[in-house]
Image: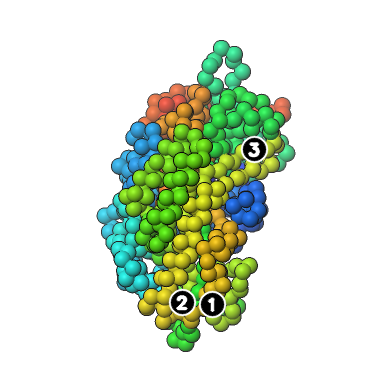
Amino acid sequence: MQLSGLVVASRLSEDPSISVLVIEAGHADLDDPSILSPAAITTHLGKDKYDWNFSTIPQDGLNGRALPWPRGKGLGGSSAINYLQFHLPAKSDIDAWEVLGNPGWNWERLKPYYKKVEGFVPPASKPDAVSFDVSQHGLDGPLTVAYPKTLSGLEIPYQEVCYYLKFLHLTEFVIQTLGTWLSPVCVDPETRVRTYSANAYYAPNAARPNLSVLSSAQVVKIEFSSMRDVTTMIATGVTFVIGNEFFTVQASQEVVIAAGAVGSPQILELSGIGDRTVLDQAGVKVKHHLPGVGTNLQEHVMLAMSFEMANDPDDKYVTLDCLRDPVQRQKQLGLLQATGTGAFSMSPTCKTFAPLSAISSSYDALQGKLKASITNRKHTQAVQKQYAVFLDHIAKKEPSCELSLVPGALRSPKAQPQPGKKYLTMNSFLNHAFSRGTIHIVSSNFQEPPAIDPHYFEEEYDLMSLVECVKFNRRLVQQEPLRSILSGVELFPGLEYDTDDKLAGYVKEYATTTFHPAGSCAMLPLDDGGVVDTKLKVYGTKNVRVVDASIIPLQIGAHIQATVYAIAELGASALADGYPKMTDVVVSGGHNQRKIQKLKDIFSDLMLLAVLSPVCLAQRD
């Protein structure tokens, strides 16, 4: 998710003495209705114009499957193609970062930046399923956030079942997330368009004379000084390509990368910073051995299951199933355009967060096996520290499982929804996985995608946690009032999956990504496999920093968009409070050279960000 570069660039350009050049690999696409329309969710996935179309390597834990890993390609990165969810993690998730050796990185420090991002719009009339405390929201931030104008009608029955099963109805998902609630989404209720970093942070400020954007330019590598008497590496600029022509932006100050959990380790390794073995195998000259680059990858994992609804002749419930009918689809599109309501305005916002102990009767046995596995397997000291935090969260019954209600059937190769039928889907998310993966380059060719290896279900506890979620969802739909709403038909996986072994097989065959990768350039102590320190500076360099989801040292129990915005706001604030130094910047391409601007060092030196390409922060002559 490369949304962070535009946040930092926008905030820094508030100072007219700082000129900012954003260099982006994808297209700008600011007026593209396919991005702006909430109705177009999922239509971007797999399309080269919007999606980098990454894929994992085949996963042993998924029966040899390789999963697509969509990543946004264009201004705003993945915030342009995501599922719009905006909510905060539990306080304990953020405080864990400090526990792992990052002084000052805790909930109290980050919370003001969540509010700084958010421009929350309370609903004109509050539906019964919605509850909130407006004092906990930011009201003036650039990113407009609101509840969907249309709810399916399934939210109240679902919440009533959750209350029966002893889950709290949270008034506000702040500090702790244990319970059931509805999440706001990044949609402007007045303009009815997606709000994301490009139209929230860049577009309103595009006319600033000190803010420029260069799109369709991809980073090749960071350039470093060849001085032999310097023990700490000094970045002198960035090489990028437009079409078939190569350019080099030269700078004597700093480079900041904001290319996301996939792009940031890729850029560092292409630049010669990373594990010596990886770089040697890829044919890249080693400039600084930093083995943590591309490791510590953590991902949420998702599994869907769908249930057929009973006949609903009065259309009491609105589900996305109507959009499969061309006539109904046109009707719903008209509603969206006329009033901003209808199926196209809905979003899967109804959620329950729970510890495994609250949904599983096998919890004690699974925890015992987990502790034995952790003890017997050879984990690094750094991973052991992370596991200790997760085990503490388990003991304190912090949420690790997320259950999300989707009104309608998802497409599945297992079974197809029937015309004229309505469905209810329950998505299960494993938010605190114990498996750790890697992202590494495989060659020196900047256009070749890196090898993404999440190591899905390398730890059996992760696999069985999702099995327990499936079993819990089956119990949930047997409770009234949901039971009377459903027909009793389980579309998928199907009741033939009636043992833990069969369900584990189903999970391996159909589990998928949640689009939330993090941790591949972790903010951790160097001895614990860290890549950046608490000032987000890359170890062993004087002037290279990373500001994006890749610095998250331990995965959070939430959709990560809001947290990445907050990290970017915090980083921008730190940059703007730094001290200035100035230097010339030159772009060279072949025999052509042109002076473009001067860099100003902030954030203890700074200047050159990347959004799968670099963002150059400069001061005008």
The residue to which callout 1 is attached is 322
Q: Secondary structure at mark 1?
A: helix
Pick whichever of labels 1 and 3 is earlier in the sequence.
1
Can the viewer see residue 606 in this picture? Answer: no
Q: Please give the name of the residue rendered at 51% of the width and 58% of the height, measured from the top-left corner.
A: 302
Q: Position of residue 504 (x, y in %)?
A: 55, 60
Q: Is label 3 in a helix, a strand or a loop? A: loop
From this viewpoint, is residue 328 visible? Answer: yes
Name the element at disc 2. loop
* Residue 318 numbered tag: 2
Disc 1 residue type? Cys
**Residue 365 occupies quadrant:** bottom left
The image position of residue 213, as x and y in percent, is 55, 42
Residue that label 3 marks: 441
Q: Residues within 10 Å of mark 3 (few under 14, many from 20)?
A: many
Q: Nearer the viewer, residue 328 or 159?
A: 159
x, y percent for residue 72? 57, 51
Tell me: 614 left or right of 156: right
- The relative height of residue 447 versus residue 34 in the rendered view (above or below) is above
